[in-house]
Amino acid sequence: MNTPTRISLLGALALFALSPLFASAMEVQANKEAMVAAGATVMDDQYLAGGTVTAAGNFSRDLAVAGGTVLVSGPIVGELLAVGGNLTFTGTVGSTARIAGGNLIIQGAVGHDLVAAGGQVIVGGPGIAGSALLAGGTVSLSAPVKGDLRIAGGDVTIDAPISGNVEVRAQRVTLGSHATIGGTFTYTAPQAATVMTGAVITGATTYHESKEVPTPTKAGIAAAAAAIFSLLFFGKVLASLVGALAIGLFFKRYAREIVKHVVKDPWGEVGRGLVVAIVMPVASILLFFTVVGIPLGILGLLVSIVLFVFTGLTAPVVAGSLVHKWIWKPGEYQVNWKIILLGVAVMLVLDLIPLIGWLIRLGIFLATLGAVAALKWSVAKEWR
């Protein structure tokens, strides 16, 4: 990564980190089940994340959702960003909709452009007021598009009026009986498109035969790599944010105790964390060399893994609270969703800084691990 790119990323993340501290126009839900019920009105930007996400309310600004199963049925005045394993959109969005996932069913009205990518993409409903960019293994379009249409996929079916130009790259292309293309029709496929009776193409048709899946260009490979990187980065940010929110908000008292331990003796907690990080896995592995100790070794490794994962999710809470206290100097250390969001951003920025950033991040992790271990040990002593 070159220097200008790194600086721009750092700047973007810094703005991302600081913005919630100056503006409250945002609502966040992160839970196993996140929901905004029908009839509810959300005046600010809304962010929903969980295993199952239902967005049925009225959204006066932008909506961003992510989950395993996602249903968006309410009207959205602003933009929609949705990611899910199985995602259904039946509402309306006033601006652009960007949707990605495994199985996508889009039956709502889009007030501007639609960008959708998934394993299976089904687009129907009232239609798209702007242009559409679709990609998937199977793509089926039965909604009218006022602008241009571009599709990349395996099996592509177009069965609706398209006012602008159409460009398709696929293994198989079908124009249904309700397809009407107002502009040009350009497509690349191993065989000529199947055109059903009733389909109309007003402009010129250009067919590029491909004996196999088109060979990606260098630009295409770079774009795909960038898309994969963006998806992985988004996944990392989402997982870190959801985990930190779950710990910081649902176990707020426990999170505050961890922060207090780190603040009281940071270097002591770093040392304790380093000992725990080394001793627990090594001791568990040594137990495997004795028949009697194998079950204890397995248990020790499992406990180590759970402890490390828990610490990794808690570290952004500690980082956010420390940075917030250091910069804004409130009366006491705080733990809330804004602080947690700040901590996640800080940890991501540290990831981008070679050596020094990694060392600071490691120090925060070890200090958090030491504090977590100390609290667990105090609880264990009370149980004796």
Image (cartoon, helix red, strand yellow):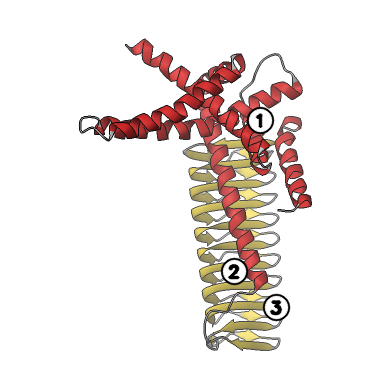
Position above or below: 279 against 356 = above
Nearer to me, 212 or 253: 212
The residue wearing badge 2 is: 143
| Nearest to N terminus: mark 2 or mark 1 | 2
Q: Secondary structure at mark 3?
A: loop
Name the mark nearer the viewer: 3 or 1: 1
The residue wearing badge 1 is: 338
Inspect the image, locate mark 1, and give the three-letter code of the amino acid beneath it. Answer: Lys
What is the CA distance from the residue labelled 2 to the residue labelled 1? 40 Å
Return the mark for residue 165: 3
Inspect the image, locate mark 2, and give the three-letter code of the amino acid beneath it. Answer: Ala
Q: Residue at x 75, y 22 (%)?
A: 328
Is residue 35 among what the camera can see?
yes
Inspect the image, locate mark 3, and give the three-letter code of the amino acid beneath it. Answer: Asn
Q: Residues within 10 Å of mark 3 (few under 14, many from 20)?
A: many
The image position of residue 137, as x and y in percent, is: 50, 69
Q: Residues within 10 Å of mark 1 (few under 14, many from 20)?
A: many
Is residue 345 among what the camera can see?
no
Q: Residues within 10 Å of mark 2 (few under 14, many from 20)?
A: many
Nearer to me, 89 or 375: 375
The image position of residue 59, as x and y in percent, is: 65, 44
| Nearest to N terminus: mark 2 or mark 3 | 2
Name the quarter where the C terminus is drawn.
top left
What is the CA distance from the residue labelled 3 to the residue labelled 1? 45 Å
| Nearest to N terminus: mark 3 or mark 1 | 3
